[in-house]
Amino acid sequence: MKKYVLPLLLLGGCLCLSGCKAQGAYKPAPTVAASSAAVELPLGKLEGNPEGMALYSACTFSYGGQDWAVESYVPAELMLDGELMLDDSCHFLLRVVSGSQDAAVLLDEQVQLGVPAADVWVDGQEQLHVTLRDVRTACYQVTDYVYRPERHAMVGSTVLDASGINYVGTTQR
């Protein structure tokens, strides 16, 4: 065994002197990203309830001296006695309504194995936030929309965008 020690030390020294460098450890590509690109959704004239859809849930509140609501709609045929009869895939429409005539659509698409939701809050600077949580089997996206009164618009930025994941569940009822 001792006869191999000296050749191994010499080999190690030669590798160090010859500029052989250790390769970095394997690092998988991140699956979570956040984007700072803002999306502006102007509040426009409310055209009534979406055709063929029923109100699934709503959060009503007052802000800036007016009544507001964040509304979630699903196909009317999936509602039974106020309950959503969810299948593997469902069309969801989430919108912000300001007063009685202005609205901005936050989400309008088919969702596979998930139920998007929105949270409403006001920060320390008195800015209105509507945070959309779009959670599906293989994706988890959080977009924070901030109301900009000077533009009469919701300006959204992606806070979390995780794809290629395996969403397990939540404690939310």
Image: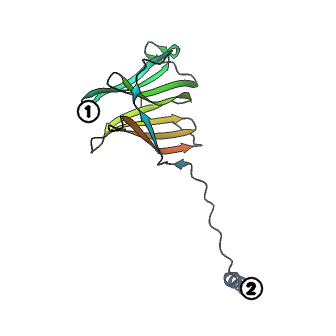
On the image, which quarter does residue 106 sit in?
Answer: top left
Give the residue drawn at x 32%, y 39%. Answer: 150
Q: CA distance from mark 1 to mark 2?
A: 80 Å
Give the residue drawn at x 32%, y 27%. Answer: 68
Q: Earlier in the sequence, mark 1 or mark 2?
A: 2
Give the residue drawn at x 36%, y 22%. Answer: 101
Q: Quadrant of the N terminus?
A: bottom right
Hey, what amino acid is under mark 2?
Pro
Disc nearest the viewer among 1 and 2: 1
Hey, what amino acid is under mark 1?
Gly
* Mark 2 burial class by Cα count in 10 Å: few <14, some 14-19, many 20+: few
Q: Which mark is residue 64?
A: 1
Give the residue drawn at x 55%, y 39%. Answer: 139
Q: Secondary structure at mark 1?
A: loop
Q: Nearer the viewer, residue 80 or 91?
A: 91
Q: Quadrant of the C terminus?
A: top left
Q: Position of residue 44 (x, y in %)?
A: 41, 27
Q: Position of residue 135 (x, y in %)?
A: 50, 35
Q: Position of residue 112 (x, y in %)?
A: 58, 29
Q: Which residue is mark 2?
A: 7
Question: Relative to 132, does residue 83 appear above or below in the rendering?
Answer: above
Q: Nearer the viewer, residue 138 or 40?
A: 40
Q: Is residue 92 left or right of residue 15?
A: left
Question: Relative to 76, does residue 23 appear above or below in the rendering?
Answer: below
